[in-house]
Each structure stands twice: as C-alpha cells, then as structure tokens.
Image (cartoon, rainbow, N blue to C red):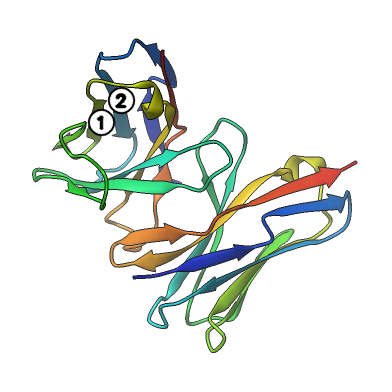
Amino acid sequence: GAVVSQHPSWVICKSGTSVKIECRSLDFQATTMFWYRQFPKQSLMLMATSNEGSKATYEQGVEKDKFLINHASLTLSTLTVTSAHPEDSSFYICSARDPQESSYEQYFGPGTRLTVT
Amino acid sequence: GENVEQHPSTLSVQEGDSAVIKCTYSDSASNYFPWYKQELGKGPQLIIDIRSNVGEKKDQRIAVTLNKTAKHFSLHITETQPEDSAVYFCAAPAGNKLTFGGGTRVLVKP
C-alpha cells in the first residue's frame, strides 16, 4: 500500500512561535493531501484540503492565516501553525490520495503531536 | 453534506468473541465505505473497505457488510485478539473528502 510520512513525530514549542509540519507521500505522487486535527478521545476533524500547485481549501471555522498550508510538489505538503497557543496543542495527521487509485481512498501519515507551552 | 454516526462508542469483549461496530450515513449517493484502525499515538490505518456494488467483503477475521437501503454498514471482527484493541473509525465520502464517524474504542480482554 501507499506510504505517507510525517515529520516531526512530536514537537514542543513555546507560545507565540511557529511550527512547521511536513507530510510526504513516499511511493506515489499525491495531487491532493488532507490535514486533520484530532483532540484526545475524539474523531478526526478535517482542517483543509491541500492541492498541488494551488491554494488550500479550508473547512469552515479553520483560520487560514493561522494554519498555513503549502503543497509545492507532488510529494510534499506542509502545515505551519503560526503564533501557536496552548489551545493549538493537538495531534495533527495528514493523508494523501493516490491518483492511480479510487478517488476516495486516503492513506494516513503517522501523525505529529504538537504541544504548545 | 454527509453525516456519519457510529455505535457503540466503546466496546469491551472477551478474547475470542466477536465484535460488531455499526455506522449509518445520510447521503444515499455515497458509494465507498472504509474502516480505519487507530492505535494509540499513531495515524489511522485502512483495514477494509467496501463499495456500493457489493453487500459484503471479508479479509481473514474482519468483514464489512453494507445495507444500502437502510444506509448502514458494519464492521465485524471474529475471534478477537488482544492486538485488536484500538479505536476504529468508519467513514463515508462527502465530495472528494471523507466524513468520519465518532469512533469506537474496542478493548479485548484476555
């Protein structure tokens, strides 16, 4: 199956700083990637859809100026949490779609745990 | 948009018994239904999926059934083992995205 990686796997940062999380598709080219946030004991909440070469599409209620998404290549999407605050502490997960397969199948990365102190 | 409800939220079973998780969806046009397993601190892993042109699909100890008329689909795990303990999520398509159920925390007691 398709493999998606994320880096870092965990990060601790101070309030007010910015953090960048990378999502890579390792063995396929992903024209579309998705960014999710997951709070403890809750389901996955879609934040935005990242499209290679174009602007990301954000879900309602997600601040696009706070969560910057860049999908500059077919194998890499980045999520930057700007001016992070403790309430941004969460588990961030990306997924990617392999255009060679079904239009719905998503392969998930291992997640990045962000702690803002 | 698509609305997915998942039950139960927690499920405790004795090792060797079966576990069943059910999801309902709202969009009758949906035609792809995946199930994901998420272990603690990890990303979700696709374990099985079903498309609307079939009613059942099996893969060793896991199976998924689909009832399009009633708009629900279920995950069946037989002969449960301790390593089946995890959180399971169902999903249904909403445009080019997936809408996830609330998750079921499964605990297999040895």
Q: Which residue is mark 2?
A: A21
Residue at the spot 30% in from the left edge and 25% down from the top edge = A21
Residue at position x 34%, y 70% in the image: B1
| Residue ID for mark 1 | A79
Marked residue nearer the N-terminal end (1 or 2) = 2
Name the residue rendered at 34%, 38% in the picture: A27
What x and y, as percent, mark residue B45?
53, 45
Does the residue at mark 1 contact the one at mark 2 (Cβ under 8 Å)? yes
Q: How many marks?
A: 2
Is B83 on the left-hand or right-hand side of B1? right
Quarter of the image holding residue A84? top left
The x, y position of residue A93, in whole percent, is 40, 37
Q: Quadrant of the image for the C terminus of chain A? A: top left
Q: Amino acid at mark 1?
A: Leu
Q: Is residue A110 above or below residue B24?
A: above
In the depicted structure, whether residue B9 falls above or below residue A54? below
User: SS of the residue at dot 2?
Assistant: strand
Residue at 73% over, 43% down? B85
Q: Which mark is residue B105?
A: none
Relative to B22, is B50 on the left or the right?
left
Residue reaching furthest to the bottom? B69
**Residue closer to the observer: A89 or A112:** A89
Determine whether A41 is above or below B27 in the image. above
Determine the secondary structure under disc 1. Answer: strand
Relative to the observer, which residue lies in front, A50 or A46?
A: A46
In the rendered image, residue B43, in percent from the top left (x then y), is placed at 50, 38
In the picture shown, does residue A87 fall above or below B44? above
